[in-house]
Amino acid sequence: MSATLPPPAVRRGPRLLGILSSTDHKHLGLLVCGGAFVFFCLGGLLALLMRSELAAPELQVMSLNAYNQVFTIHGSTMFYLFGAPMALGFGLYLVPLQIGASGLRWPRLVLLGFWLFLGAGLLMYAGFLTQEGAGRAGWFAFDPLSDDVGTPGTGMDLWVISVFLSVLAGMLWAASILATIIRHRAPGMTMLRLPVFTWSMVVSSLMTLVAFPALLLAMGLLFIERHGLDVFTQPGGAIFYQHLFWFFGHPVVYIVFFPFLAAGSEAIATSAGQRFFGYKLFVGSLLAFAALSVSVWGHHMFVTSSVDNRFFSLTTTAIIVVAGVEYFDNLATMFRGRIKLRASFLFACGFMIVFLIGGLSGIWVASPPLDYNAHDTYSVVAHFHYTLFGGTVFGMFAGIYHWFPKVTGRLLDERLGRWHFWLMLLGGLVTFIPQFFVGEQGMVRRIADYPETAGWTALNALSTVGAFIILLSLLIFLANLIRSLRLGKPSGPDPWDGHTLEWATSSPPPRYNFPAVPPVRSYAPLLDLKEEAAEDESSHRPVASGEGGSQ
Amino acid sequence: MVDTRDTWQDLFNLYLPIGVGVFVVITLLVVIFAVRYRDRGAEDDRPRRRRSHFTGAEGSYILLLALIAAMLVYFTFTEMGDDRANLPAEASTGTGELKQGGADEEGQDGIQAPPAELEIQVTAARWTWRFDYPELGITQASGGGGELTTLVVPTGVNVRFTMTSLDVIHSFYIPQLRFKRDAFPERLTSFTLGFTEPGDYPKGGFCAEFCGLRHAAMLFRVSAMEPERFRAWVTQRQLEARG
């Protein structure tokens, strides 16, 4: 199919330079996802440093000051430089393909976003080179700890600027994705025929545009505060900062969740060989989920005595309903399918099981009296790592195994993929389950050292072992990635018998994606065509099957 | 008497079995579906799912989820009603020395704080704790050199705490009471606790809100005494204070 296309536009200069200044959404998506993946690895290395320090009481690996920098930059990296960029980066690459568009709206803004994001990352890590060290007030940098008295130094200023830039980049990407979905859908692609992944990007972009400005404001004010003007030092200022922060901070955990939930759902529907179940309800639940996401931020403030705990407990517990619908639809999509147990499907199942621990413990901490114990202890650390590691990371790998052939034209190795999956599942359980127990016994977070008498040593050592199992699984993935990029089996345009439009063009897709967009009659347009072709075949009319794009 | 441990335990006993049960059911479903409906090659002629939505099943399922959520909220609210230590900070506590700040007005609902027999003022500062007993003229503070402050309380009665911070946000956390509260600068936080068991609490107390370099070392000891022993301790401390 791609052979019939005109050759790509004349290349100016070397290839990398071309990609770094490209307005092709595929290059943009790859830049953002690639950058986010590098930061994921860096953030992971910081986590290993922390786990090494915590394996035994006393200080062995690093100083208190270094530990505070390490956990701050770990959390900040994973949210500002990995989670949100990776989630939106998936959208930059896939949304135009899924809706039959030739590219993104406002691609130059997206490119600007990439450079802001790159600057954000470099600035945050440049903090390690400053005299006082990098940002060290935690990823939420509560005022007054984060002001110029609490945490003086250039590194902390760099942190504030970095977060500001990364949030700005996220807003540019979200605006572009949303505008693309609204303005550039192929003929026939109504809003209620968008694939589930694209719907997840609609709600993620909406939440980004609603919630990120709050953090932009908080970082701007914090910068002003650090440079001489009183902002948060006014009475109630510390609480005001927390409201601003968590109004951003809770939606953001759903922004880094929905796209990967939907990536898992696409992998499940494709692997099971049947249409995604309960599409309309799923879309409705995503929208309700997004609406609820801006009403729950106060559950991070149950122990501040300054929010109505009952209200936020109620809204947070209501999340059960919308999250439950998503589990129902994924399970019903598997029901009576012909499931091919590929790596992408395994990761989607891993997502459902591992995230479930995070979801259920989230209902737990939504009950204020239970949170009075769990808040700021390792129980909460374990809880949100199950949502982020189980949700974001497992879902991301489901998406990577699912879409890698589309992006590169080559298949990832399935055997290595299975090793990767089982080790990561084991590592995820061994690392974070012990943290529920030490947290329940009172081990607070963000401490480099804990009393030997507390009896937390064995569980912490176990957790450290788990972290290194995760490292092993990621090394296997990296080996698979490097090997498959060069030697992977050619995938062809549609290796999984896909349901959505991205599988109707070559792998990787040409510059403007589609020579001709297939007709769209539902949220699974390729599946429609394949079913029609099968019916035609049974009435003895030979039809080229597989791509469906030629019609 | 306020018993935060009891409240926690009641909810623990409700939430844990439900959580574990749901986890087991869904995990089993995922595994069973993945095995049972796996692709078995060409001769596979099992029936396929015929519909791609099923309004009746979806509706009843949503209703079930909503009922579970409503039940959890109901029990949580009921327990919170009993646990009056959760009241927001009072608008005025009359402890003149501490400045009142912040928006503490909401959530009053006309509920009074439970009557308390002892007032303790908690002052958190990087990276140590001070406990003042204004009615008794006693101050518990660290002697320096990494020595921990000891919170001494009587058992069996309500103790009213009024807390503030001198610098950044800290959090007063006693794991054995399953309770923590944040301490803010320029702002009072009040809560009531009851201590049931006498003795030194092995884990003592922690600062739970990250507060900078020595956050990990910002601990305090907790010693609960039966009222008689507590009175003796008070007399001894008052004599010491007079020197």
Image: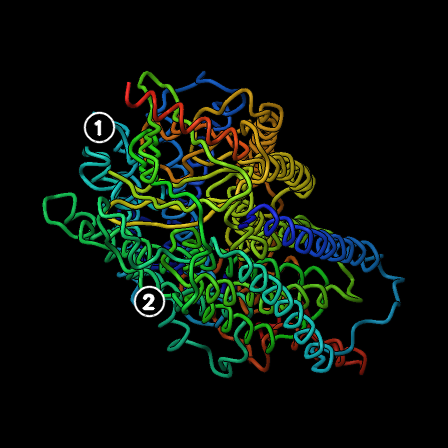
Q: Which color mode does the image show?
A: rainbow
Image quadrant holding the C terminus of chain B, namely: top left
In the displayed image of the protein, which residue is found farthest to the left? A228
Name the quadrant containing residue B88.
Answer: bottom left
- Give the residue at x 58% y 64%: B78
Name the spot of residue A139 as percent of width and height, x first: 36, 43
Q: Is residue A240 left or right of residue B191?
A: left
Looking at the rendered structure, the secondary structure element under dot 1 is loop
Provide the chain ID for the residue under circle 2: A
Looking at the rendered structure, the secondary structure element under dot 2 is helix
Name the spot of residue A430 as percent of width and height, x first: 64, 34
- What amino acid type is highlighted by mark number 1? Thr
Q: Which residue is mark 1?
A: A130
Which residue is more in the foreground, A146 or B156?
A: B156
Sequence-first tag of 1 and 2 = 1
Name the spot of residue A291 as percent of width and height, x first: 45, 71
Which residue is more in the foreground, A302 or A534?
A: A302
Name the spot of residue A400 as percent of width and height, x first: 55, 50
User: Residue A175's mark?
Assistant: 2
Residue A273 position (above or below residue B217): below
Residue A162 appears anywhere in the view: no
Provide the chain ID for the residue under circle 1: A
Q: Is residue A392 left or right of residue B107?
A: right
Which residue is more in the foreground, B88 or A101?
A: B88
- What amino acid type is highlighted by mark number 2? Ala
Q: Is residue B21 left or right of residue B77?
A: right
Residues tagged 1 and 2 counted as in contact (Cβ below 8 A): no
